[in-house]
Amino acid sequence: MCAKISVGKSYRAVAHEFNTSASTAYAIFKRWKDNETFDSKPRKGRPKKPTLTEASSAGKDCERAEGDDE
């Protein structure tokens, strides 16, 4: 899709080939042009809950830091 738009084909023509809307074709091309990726950007909001492994390793780091003070 992005290659066809880069060559000069219209958003509407490319969207018709891929059976989607011109606004979707534009959004996909813009994301590629700006970020050189099709991945979504991270969203705002509450951070994800740490996994059990992450939580236990964070606790061990705190225990080691407390032992270093003595």
Image (cartoon, helix red, strand yellow):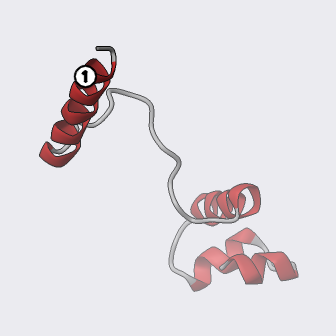
Identify the residue at horizontal 67%, vertical 79% (top origin).
14
What amino acid type is highlighted by mark number 1? Answer: Gly
Identify the residue at horizontal 61%, vertical 74% (top origin).
15
Farthest top residue in view: 70
- x, y percentage for residue 13? 70, 79
- x, y percentage for residue 46? 32, 27
Label 1's element?
A: helix
The one nearer the camera, 13 or 32, is 32
Q: Quadrant of the C terminus?
A: top left
Q: Is residue 45 left or right of residue 23?
A: left
Farthest left residue in view: 52
**Residue behind mark 1:** 67
Identify the residue at horizontal 50%, vertical 54% (top origin).
40
How crowded pointer 1 is (Cα within 10 Å; few <14, some 14-19, many 20+) is rated as few
- x, y percentage for residue 1? 65, 79
Q: Quadrant of residue 68?
A: top left
Q: How many marks?
A: 1
Identify the residue at horizontal 60%, vertical 85% (top origin).
17
Farthest right residue in view: 8
- x, y percentage for residue 66? 26, 18
The one nearer the camera, 57 or 51, is 57
Q: Quadrant of residue 65?
A: top left
Q: Is residue 34 above or below residue 61?
A: below
The one nearer the camera, 64 or 6, is 64
